Structures are given as C-alpha cells and as structure tokens.
C-alpha cells in the first residue's frame, strides 16, 4: 500500500519548488505533510474527496489549506480534488443537485438545461441550496468511505506482513532447532 502511494504521488521536491506554492513559506517544511503513514494517508484521502465535491473554484487551494491545518498528506489531498475535473464535473454536480433535491423533498428544476455560464447564473438562485446540500452529503459520504478504506487496507497490509514475518521466524527457528538436533545426534553416535 505504501509503495503504491509512494510511486503514485508527485515528488516532494517538485511540490515544494512550485512557484504558486511559495506563499506558504515554511509551512511546506512540516514532515507530516509528506509522510506516508496510515493516519496521514487516510486524512489526506478524506480531505481530498470531501473538497472534490464542493462546487467552488480553486478547490486545490482549499484542499492544501485543510491538509496543512490538519497535518495530513498534502499531495494526496490536492491530487484527489481532480476527481472533479472539467469532464466529470457536470455529471457529479448534477447528481449532487439531484441528491440535495431528493433530501429536501423539492421537485427538480424543470426546463432547458444547458452547460453555459448564462444558464448557471440565471438558475443559481434556485439550485444553490439543493446543490450545496447534495455536495455536502456526497462529499461527507465519499470522504468517510475513503478514510475507512485506506485505514482498512493499511491494517490488512500490516496484518499480512506480520503474518509473513511470523512464518519466516518460525521457519528459521524450526530449521535452527533441526540442525541443533541433528548435530546432537551426530555427537552421540
């Protein structure tokens, strides 16, 4: 699990040297932001997934700020925001709106739907509340699932490594005992 994240996430030196992040100064030097531990990765996953569902511009800055404040893995939190990219954003936010409208018990907006700035600005007054609620619910749900999934997979991996280690130690112990026993038998004869 740790190897997967180590190879998948961008290098620390590239992120620290990025010109748009220089305003953070020494905050980027906190080792917890780059550490690959269960807590750090699970927290980074939760923050990244939650922020991905928030329908605001500059989600990456919010994810970075939350990762810095909570001291969790910064690269993972920032990279997961790209779940909602220009291709996936319309269906995700439309589904968020539908979930919010369902939870509020209000009928969905009827009429012509178009992916244009004019339509969005004219409809924002009626869709913002269901969209916000749906985004919050889906963000919380996906963040919880991501947090539990990383924790569970991490624990499973550690359990598997300990089991392998135990078997290896037992094999070595039994082999050493067998050699000692064989040596003792040779000495007696």
Image (cartoon, helix red, strand yellow):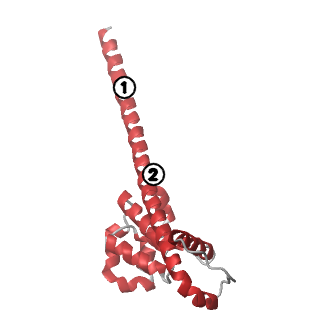
Instruction: Indicate whether 39 appears above or below 65.
Output: above
Q: Nearer the viewer, residue 110 or 149?
A: 110
Q: Position of residue 183 (x, y in %)?
A: 33, 18
Specify the quadrant that holds the C terminus.
top left
Q: Nearer the viewer, residue 20 or 148?
A: 148
Residue 11 visible in the snapshot: no
Q: Is residue 92 above or below residue 57?
A: above
Q: Position of residue 107 (x, y in %)?
A: 59, 75
On residue 28, the disc is none
Dot 1 falls on a residue whose secondary structure is helix
On the image, which quarter does residue 37 sit in? bottom left
> Label 2's element?
helix
Q: Which is nearer the N-term, disc 2 or disc 1?
A: 2
Asked if the residue at tag 1 contacts the one at tag 2, i.e. Cβ–Cβ closer than 8 Å, the answer is no
Q: Which residue is mark 1?
A: 174
**Residue sitting farthest toward the right:** 112
Q: Is residue 40 above or below residue 55?
A: above
Q: Which residue is located at x 52 percent, y 82 percent?
A: 128
Q: Residue at x 37, y 26 (%)?
A: 174
Q: Residue 144: give x, y in percent of width and height.
A: 43, 61
Separation (CA) of disc 2 from disc 1: 31 Å
Q: Nearer the viewer, residue 72 or 92?
A: 92
Q: Residue at x 61, y 78 (%)?
A: 86
On the question of residue 188 being in view, the answer is yes
Q: Which residue is mark 2?
A: 153
């Amino acid at each position: 699990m740790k190897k997967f994240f180590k190879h998948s996430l961008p290098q620390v030196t590239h992120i620290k040297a990025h010109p748009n992040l220089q305003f953070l100064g020494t905050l980027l030097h906190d080792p917890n932001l780059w550490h690959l531990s269960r807590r750090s990765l699970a927290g980074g996953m939760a923050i990244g997934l939650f922020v991905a569902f928030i329908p605001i511009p500059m989600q990456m800055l919010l994810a970075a700020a939350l990762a810095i404040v909570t001291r969790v893995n910064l690269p993972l939190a920032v990279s997961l925001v790209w779940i909602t990219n220009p291709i996936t954003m319309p269906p995700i936010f439309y589904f968020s709106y539908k979930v919010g409208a369902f939870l509020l018990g209000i009928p969905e907006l009827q009429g012509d739907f178009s992916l244009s700035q004019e339509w969005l600005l004219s409809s924002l007054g009626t869709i913002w509340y269901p969209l916000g609620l749906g985004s919050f619910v889906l963000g919380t749900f996906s963040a919880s699932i991501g947090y539990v999934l990383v924790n569970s997979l991490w624990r499973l991996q550690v359990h598997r490594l300990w089991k392998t280690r135990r078997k290896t130690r037992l094999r070595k112990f039994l082999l050493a005992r067998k050699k000692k026993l064989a040596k003792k038998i040779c000495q007696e004869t």
